[in-house]
Image (cartoon, rainbow, N blue to C red):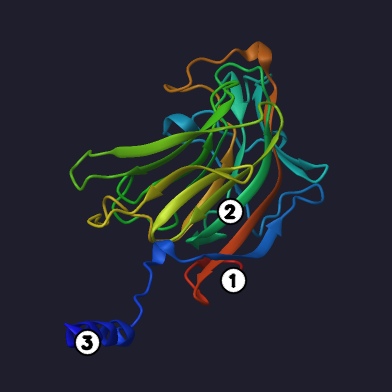
Amino acid sequence: MTTIVMLCVAAAVAAPAKTAPASARAVRWELKFTEDFNGTKLNEKLWTRIDKGNPDWMKKMSLRPDLVTVSGGQLHCWGKRNEDLEADPRTHLTGGVMTKDRFAMKYGKIEFRMKLDNGQKGAWPAVWMMPQTTVLGWPNDGEIDIVERLNSDAFVYQTVHFGTGEKGGHKSRGGKGKIKNGDWNVYGLEWTPEAIVWTVNGTETFRHAKGPNDDSFKYPWTTPFYLMIDYQLGGNWVGGVDESTLPKAMHVDWVKFYHGSRDGKRFSEFVNPRK
């Protein structure tokens, strides 16, 4: 008996320590740059305007200059009544910006301080991410919705969209984050190879983790994604627009971009224009 006990103790001492799984090891976030919207013009090295298109959310988007403004150290994306129907027959128009072809990130962290106007009907402001390079098309290449707010809700939707590997297959998973309604809030997204985590004012509100058997269809968030900030009006989800409540806007004070590392090794990647 004594010999057996001693052998067991010796084996325990000699056994190498197990390495904790990556998801359990601490992540270090390093701030790389901040977009603070100083001046009176959009930083065209980072942002480009979103034009109209066929998808539901793009139908009211316009390149009209007054729909995206920079003033007071803030970005303002507007939803407005269209007073010049001869130039554009759409009764209301919206503005938005994106970093497509200028900046994308694979993993990392984003934070932004934003205030959303209240009191409107049919409003759908959003901050979200799409893949810089499309391979299989939507939704198979993935989508990350950091913030979507309908009308004057006191919460925001936080969602991922992905495919099933079958034609027309679409799945989504999401949660809700409570906000200080009509006030400034700091929204965050922490994206690692193992999970996507949403925060509001520093508190985790939703998490989507990669499952042990998830393939590239169930977890497609492994390529660089670009960022979009846009004010939307109307659509199948939010419904009709009460034009008497316009103009309304989303106001962004700053956006911060962080690299992520674990055990001294960086796992995030930034592509064009900043490293």
Q: Where residue 156 sits: x, y (%)?
A: 54, 32
Q: Marks 3 and 1: CB-CB under 8 Å?
A: no
Q: Is residue 10 above or below residue 58?
A: below
Residue under circle 3?
7
Where does the image place residue 204, in percent across and percent down from the top left? 53, 44
Question: What residue does disc 2 label?
Answer: 110
Observer able to see residue 13: yes
Dot placed on the residue nearer the N-terminal end, 3 or 2: 3
**Left or right: 7 in relation to 177:** left
Residue 35 lies, in percent from the top left, at 70, 55
Nearer the viewer's eye, disc 1 or disc 2?
A: 2
Which residue lies under the disc numbered 1? 275
Q: Which amino acid does label 3 sit on?
A: Leu
* 78 on left or right of 266: right
Q: Where is residue 107 in the image (x, y as percent from the top left)?
A: 47, 61
Mark 3 or 1: the one toward you:
3
Secondary element at tag 2: strand
Q: Closer to the camera, 133 or 189? A: 189
Q: Is residue 123 above or below residue 174?
A: above
**Disc 1 residue crowd, few under 14, some 14–19, many 20+, Cα 10 Å:** few
Q: For marks 3 and 1, give the CA distance.
A: 53 Å
Q: Look at 74% across and 52% down and name the residue there.
A: 36
Q: Which of marks 3 and 1 is nearer the N terminus?
A: 3
Q: Quarter-wise, where is residue 192 in the image? A: bottom left
Residue drawn at point x = 38 percent, y = 60 percent: 222
Which amino acid type corresponds to the residue marked 2 in the rendered image?
Ile
Between marks 1 and 2, how big is the CA–CA gap? 15 Å
